Image (spheres, grey):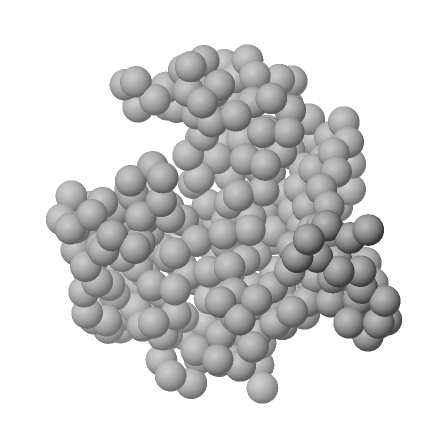
Amino acid sequence: MEPQGRRAVSDEKESDFLKAFQQWITDNSYAREVELSFADCDRNKNVRPAKLLSLVAAAGGYDYDARGLTHQKLYEMGQVFLLSGIALRIHRRPVNREVLTITTWEDGAHGAHMRRVYEITDESGAVCVSAKSEWILIDPADRKILRPASFTGKPLTTCPKSIDCPDCRRITLPREGTEMLGTRLVRWSDLDGNGHVYSGNYGDIVWDVLPADLQGAPLGELYINYSREALLGETLTLQGFREGNSYTVEGRLEEGHCFSCRCEFDPD
């Protein structure tokens, strides 16, 4: 007998829409299935860059959670991560209602940064998006930057495969030829559980000020640097620069630089 309020699904067409999403872990990787909704996509039903940034930012946390290294545990150890930069390469832009798998691997360290890489694949196994990210380790009490060798949560591993994505890179505006894009007040809905603008939300901030002809253009690569957290009530001053099929947006706070984002669009 079916539980009250539930019924068996016998119609094959209807059952195609009922899927149990999974997650799995190996010695050096973590994977999770997700489904894109209207809220994750733009007016053309293509995934929003903000959603891709959010998937990348969250995957490492899910990985460590599955290994018992929750945010609370890391905080108690005096070792937490701050996102420094992301690079994305879009091979095919996913669309509304697609079921995707995001897989992430640690990828060692370089200088002060700990690295993590990603692939987002569709149900056929084809790679839609590749990504790389860099993180810094800090002491949450005094905000002091710690060297990667100081991390005691687990031994760092490296990705066993090549990821088809450029490395993260430093983004700067040129001295001349820039344009003012206005200001953006940090609102309550911009904030995450850490009390600052969520890293993925910068994708929407950038797309809101792009030239109209680029907002729906096919994105090829995206690079973003995070330099300073933006808090409730602060104002971002936005400046931009267009160069061929690329556009760079920089956001500054009263205290200094906050973020930079370079968007590289595929030629027509």
Q: Nearer the viewer, residue 193 or 122?
A: 193
Say which quarter of the image contains residue 164. bottom right
Q: Residue at x 50, y 14 (%)?
A: 150
- Expressed as whole percent of the image width and height from the top left, the position of residue 20 reads 74, 52
- Expressed as whole percent of the image width and height from the top left, the position of residue 114 reads 54, 31
Q: Residue at x 51, y 59 (%)?
A: 51
Residue 157 is left or right of residue 80, and the answer is right
- Expressed as whole percent of the image width and height from the top left, the position of residue 222 reads 51, 61
**How many labels were placed on the picture?**
0
Q: Nearer the viewer, residue 221 or 67?
A: 67
Q: Residue at x 51, y 21 (%)?
A: 148
On the question of residue 129 being in view, the answer is: no
Q: Nearer the viewer, residue 235 or 245?
A: 235
Q: Nearer the viewer, residue 153 or 123?
A: 123
Looking at the rendering, in which quadrant would you find the C terminus? bottom right
Residue 210 is left or right of residue 153, and the answer is left
Say which quarter of the image contains residue 248. bottom left
- Expressed as whole percent of the image width and height from the top left, the position of residue 265 reads 53, 74
On the question of residue 181 being in view, the answer is: yes
Q: Residue at x 17, y 55 (%)?
A: 235
Say which quarter of the image contains residue 94. bottom right
